[in-house]
Structure formats: structure tokens, C-alpha cells
Amino acid sequence: MLTLLARLLRALNSETGPWALAIAFVLGMIMGFTPLWRVHNLVILLIALLFRVNLSGFILSFVICSGLAYLLDPLFHQVGFAILSAESWQPVWQSMYSSAFWRVVQFHHTITLGSLVVSLAFAPVLAVMSYWVISQYRKRIQAWFNRLRLVQALKANRFWAIYSDLRG
């Protein structure tokens, strides 16, 4: 876990673009909010690996959002149930369920559909928020943070040694 945090700090302090880190957080959030063993999560993982997003940010976002998903499951269920029970969409859902491909994708499960819809709706908000936080961190907080006595004390322990080794 210390190595993961050290790599994330390395990415925050590096020349990696803020949008690249923000996209990593968004992909991790989508994968964390939705049930793990679903086809769309394989697509998200493939996107994360093909486009070489920051894996530390991706994994950290995935872990945090997986924990939050248990708290948000009732909301995901309500959203998915509302979408699946909408009368005007019934022919669409029936035709999708009659296809083997759509049964494998499992959008007929309330939590799967609800969590995917909520995470896709929240994705632009998280992307902009992450970009802003990373930009503000780099502009204002990074220099001030390095002058704190606590940070100077942390630089003397094992965490800083791991971080320094990763920086190269």
C-alpha cells in the first residue's frame, strides 16, 4: 500500500498531465462502482491498459470507489429498477434480453445498470474536479506542503525512501 501511495505522489509531482491522472481516476471510479465481474469492466480495464493511464491513480480510485459502492448500492438499485421498469422501455429490454450477448453483459440486473448509469453521469464531474484538484495541488500546495515539519520528518522514514527510489 505504501508503494501505491508513493507512486501516486510521484505521478502528482511529475510532469504527467492533469487530464491523464483525472481520466485514471474516472476509469477507476466506473470500475469500482459497478459489480466487478462484468463485461464492461473488462472493456474499461482494456482502455486503461491500452491508453496507459496512471495505474496507481486507477487502482486507488478503484479501491476507494469499491468501498463506497457498498454504501451506494441501494441508490444504484433504485436507479436501475426505475430504468428497467419504465413502461416505454419495456420493448427495448425484452429484445435485449432475448439476445445472448445482452444477457452476458447483464444490464438486466438493477445494480449493474444503475451503478453504470450513475457512474457515467458522475464521470464528467469527477474528471473536472480531479483536474482542478491536481492543478491546484501543483500550483499552491506542493511547495507549501514540502516546508511542513511533518513532511520533513516523513522524509526521514521508509515511506520517503520508497518514494525516492521510485522517482529515480
Image (cartoon, rainbow, N blue to C red):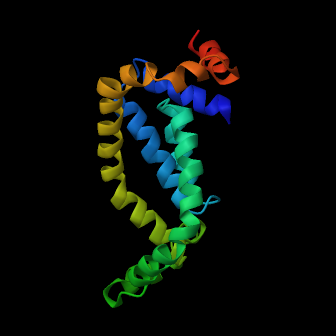
Q: Nearer the viewer, residue 85 or 89?
A: 85
Q: What residue is drawn where x is 30% and y is 26%?
A: 140
Q: Where the C terminus falls, by quadrant? A: top right
Task: In this rendered view, identify the residue nearer to me: 102 or 39.
Answer: 39
**Which of the 4 image quarters holds residue 103?**
bottom right
The foreground one among 62 and 157 is 157
Q: Residue at x 45, y 71 (%)?
A: 114
Can I make out residue 106 in this image? Answer: no
Counting from the top left corner in percent of width and height, residue 87 is at: 34, 90
Q: Position of residue 98 (x, y in %)?
A: 53, 79
Quick one: which residue is furthest to the front in this view? 149
Residue at x 57%, y 26% (from the top left corner): 7
Residue 64, image x, y percentages = 55, 51
Displayed quadrant of residue 66: bottom right
- Can you give x and y, in whole percent of width and height, for residue 106 in the image? 56, 70
Q: Is residue 129 left or right of residue 41?
A: left
